[in-house]
Amino acid sequence: MKRCLLKRRKKRHRNQQLYINDLLDRETGRENRSRTMKNKANSLFIREGSVFLNHLIVISKNTFSGGNVMKFHEWFAATLLVLVGSVAFLSLFSYTGTLVYSTWWEKDRLDRETQLASVDVSEMSEEEAAAALEGEINAWQEEASVTLTWYDETITLPNDMFTFDVDTTVEQVFAGEGYENGIIVRADESELKKQLSLFVFAEDPAHKTNTEALALDLEAEVAFLPAEDTVKHVHDYLYEEVKPMEGLIQTANRSVTHSEQLMAWVSAMDHVTIPAEGTFSLLGTMEERGLDPVKSEDLVVLASAVYEALLWSNFEVLERSQRHELLDGVPLGFDANVVPFERNLVFFNPNASGYDLHLRMENNQLTAELHGLPLPYDIRVEVEQTAEIEPKTRVRFSSQRTEGDRAVIDNGAPGYQARTVRTIARWDEEEPERETVSEDYYTAQNRLEEWSIEERITEEEEDEDFIFDPADPDGDNGDNGDPWGNNGQDDDPFGNGDDNDPWGSDDNGDPWGNGEQDQDNNNQWNGNGQNGSDPADPGNNSQWPPSENNNQTPGGSGTNPFEPGNGSGNGTGTQPGQGGSGPGNGFPPSQPGQDSDSSLPPGQESGEYEEEDIDIKGY
């Protein structure tokens, strides 16, 4: 706006400069013509005066000499008479010539330093002054802006609705009137009513407005062709019976603990004015009141109350932040994190009138109130909880607890995802305007439990018993450990017992052969299980090789790292023997196996305390 105003001023200045130059040229020509006419008049009077003086001299000679030779005193008297008469004649005719010119030839002109509206009309005639005013009016109509405001709406009036009477204005000026009233102008009141009807938030606003008074005030300002924009607030011209009065708009409360710091802040900011079309900054206001804001929960609670109170208006949110976690006493959706020099709370008031923010503390209750003209909208603020995030459970193991002894160290807290929506409904709109003011996300705080370390060992043993089958990563295959089928049912396209099964158990070309043991002596997935003693292999679906293949006898000394011993002897391989009568739950050779009734891992003495956080399946 300032830039446009500056451009208009520059353009108007250029127009005025060109006009002044033209006036100077015309004034120079006028002065030359005036000087020429004056010279002609003076020459005429001087010529006629010379004849008169000659006659005067002759008369003087005859009078004093009487036809004889003049004496000295007679000559002196005659000469003195001639000189006095000449001076009187020159003075008389010089004044008379100027008077005659002014009376018969020169037109009336204005005095020096005469200004009408914003136009300098010094020493101009009526025609020149009228031309100057017409030029300035045309420039003003091209550049000027006359607007009406009502709450947060603005309407620009067409400049052609103003009619200027230049001739009457100039006549009054030359008659000694109208210097202080500017140019005579009339505003089209019917067009003014038409423009008022464009305000959308009120029904029939033209009938609620004193358009006659508004038109008169517009004429009074436009008469001086102001360089600045002309703005009128419609609320000031409403009839008293329909004009709303200022009052309470919204209240926000917060329960707080006793805090001298918070009480000092509230006391210093008990009444804050938010100017029309201006901004409100919480940190800026505190600085203006001589306060020293510090990062604290008190500042967050104060900002939250102010945020909620101002949100129930048509104010625009320019800056607002949330905390990583919601404080107790701060409602979900109204969080406002303010940190000096980092984060602030800033609103913009788009209305044509100012509003007041009131703060007070009573009985550990913080109250923020917004006062002002009631807004012509139906405003609603809703907080939509879009999701609730359940906390995870983490376990800490301790040797100080016995198996089954568990304790909750921290209950944790759920997380939330919320959306704050403001709805502004006007009387003529079927669907109100919905604005998403903020979207907040708070992570869940994990639940922490403490268990006995014995339960951790049990979990590790279960993990060791589990053998990963690449053909069945989910462990969802059929009965009897069949990695491909469901006991060879006819409807199983990959059954292991049906003749139509493309992977049938009796097909010697089966790459996953379940037939004779001599088909692939090196395949550890051969499944006949002949001569095997694995009690977990009831049928021909064992995924471990038979006892004759590659000397992998149960409980033997083989070094296959994937094969636990299945016999009754001691396991001597790189994996401990399973189900034997010896040290059945041993560890690899680097850690000698412990007795099956031991509850501690090797290398750890009884009673030693260990804590560790791990994720537990199923939580």
Image (tube, rainbow, N blue to C red):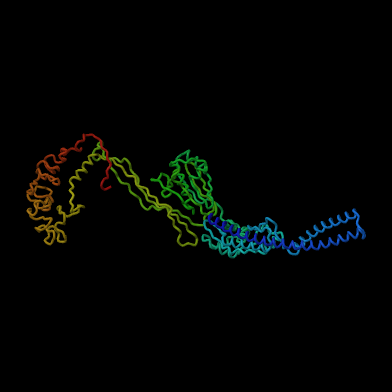
Residue that lies at the very extreme toward the bottom in this rendered image: 190
Quarter residue 130 falls in: bottom right
Question: Looking at the image, is 145 positioned above or below residue 534?
Answer: below
Residue 397 appears in the rendering: yes
Q: Which of 379 and 79 is in front in this view?
A: 79
Left or right: where 324 falls relative to 2: left
Question: Looking at the image, is 594 positioned above or below residue 317?
Answer: above
Left or right: where 72 falls relative to 526: right
Residue at 53% x, 62% y: name it: 198
Left or right: where 68 falls relative to 114: right
Residue 595 appears in the rendering: no
Residue 98: percent from left, percent from top = 76, 60
Residue 126: percent from left, percent from top = 68, 63
Q: How many labels does the image show?
A: 0
Q: Nearer the viewer, residue 618 or 511?
A: 511
Residue 330: percent from left, percent from top = 42, 46
Quarter residue 147 falls in: bottom right
Residue at 47% x, 39% y: name it: 261
Residue 576: percent from left, percent from top = 14, 42
